[in-house]
Amino acid sequence: MLKDTAKAAWEYGRQFLMKGKVADYIPELGKANPVHLGLCIKTPEGETIEFGDVEQRFTMQSISKVVCLATALQHEGFDTVFSHVMMEPSGDAFNSILKLDTASNRPFNPMINAGAIEIVNLLAPTFSFEQLLDFVRAICMDDEITLDEAVYHSEAATGDRNRAIGYLLKSKDVLTGDVLQTVDLYFKLCSLSVNARSLAGLGLILANGGVDPRNGIRLLSAQTVRTVKTLMFTCGMYDRSGEFAVRVGIPCKSGVGGGIMASVEHQMGIGTFGPSLDEKGNSIGGGSTLEYLSRELHLHIFDSEPQ
Ligand code: GLN
């Protein structure tokens, strides 16, 4: 039953691939194949259901913001984290600099670039890139995650807007570390190479309250997971988060590499990969696959239909 619905959702999603466009503002991302679409679902009982391009590797991009936030909440605590970033949807593009110099000194939320760069600034004195990579591997249930050097260099060579955000934060004494080193670590975390399975693994651990269901090991506290999922729900799909909450109603986080990671409370983690993006930077195939799944399986958090 779940398998049939998943297959139908993936087939539905494939119809929309040609309506989008792969990201090319990071030149290396422009090499992605827009007809790829992969769907992976993992349940706490150990079932994995997958269709399409689930082995294809791509970079995590903004989905790394979830892991950075979770790590910061665990190690710095809720109050410190939210003295550096706010928890409000910005309604602006993910890389916008606008509100940072008008509405507030603190970035609006940790799911946009400004907020994530500030969170990385909090992590940088404590964690090396290698330590963060180890944690990403554990929380995605994927030991094969590595740095995609080509994407990293491509992003570093073209990432002046992110450096500008870093300098603006520094000028306001919000970012206290070294701007170039902070943004460099941010670029590396965006350039970790995952697949739809890794994202389903991350979604599953969040759905399971921070515990790896394979071995019962707790990777994140329940409080951290609750905060992270709330911010995914309200801010995880850039300036389409409101529409996504209405249409899909599942905490999700997308990245311009084409991934979407979704977490259905107690039920499943979902990873999709489709590098053809809508104009806001969300995977068009992944988004429509999730919309179909949510509708058919009543996964919307406010769905009152019986399962
Ligand atoms: N590395 C990308 C950037 O900073 C991440 C953006 C994204 O996935 N939306 O522009």
Image: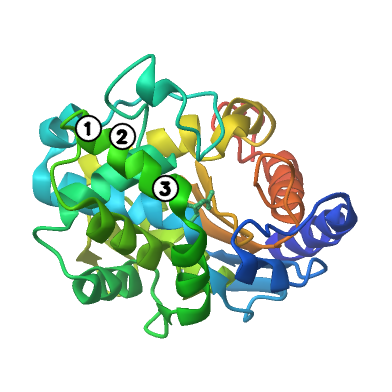
Mark number displayed over residue 162: 3
Residue that badge 2 annotates: 168
Vertical comparison of 109 with 9: above or below? above
Dot 1 surroundings within 10 Å: few (below 14), some, or many (20 or more)? few
Q: Is mark 3 within 8 Å of ligand 1?
A: yes
Q: Seen from this angle, which residue lies furthest top?
A: 103
Residue 46 visible in this rendered orientation of the protein: no
From the top left corner, tell me how far across and down residue 241 is, in percent.
57, 32
Report how far apart the C-alphas of labels 2 and 3 lie in the structure. 10 Å
The amino acid type of the residue labelled 2 equals Leu
Is 225 on the left or on the right of 298, as rendered? left
In which quadrant is the N terminus drawn? bottom right
Q: Nearer the viewer, mark 1 or mark 3?
A: 1
Residue that badge 1 annotates: 171
Vertical comparison of 60 with 252: above or below? below
Q: Quadrant of residue 192?
A: bottom left
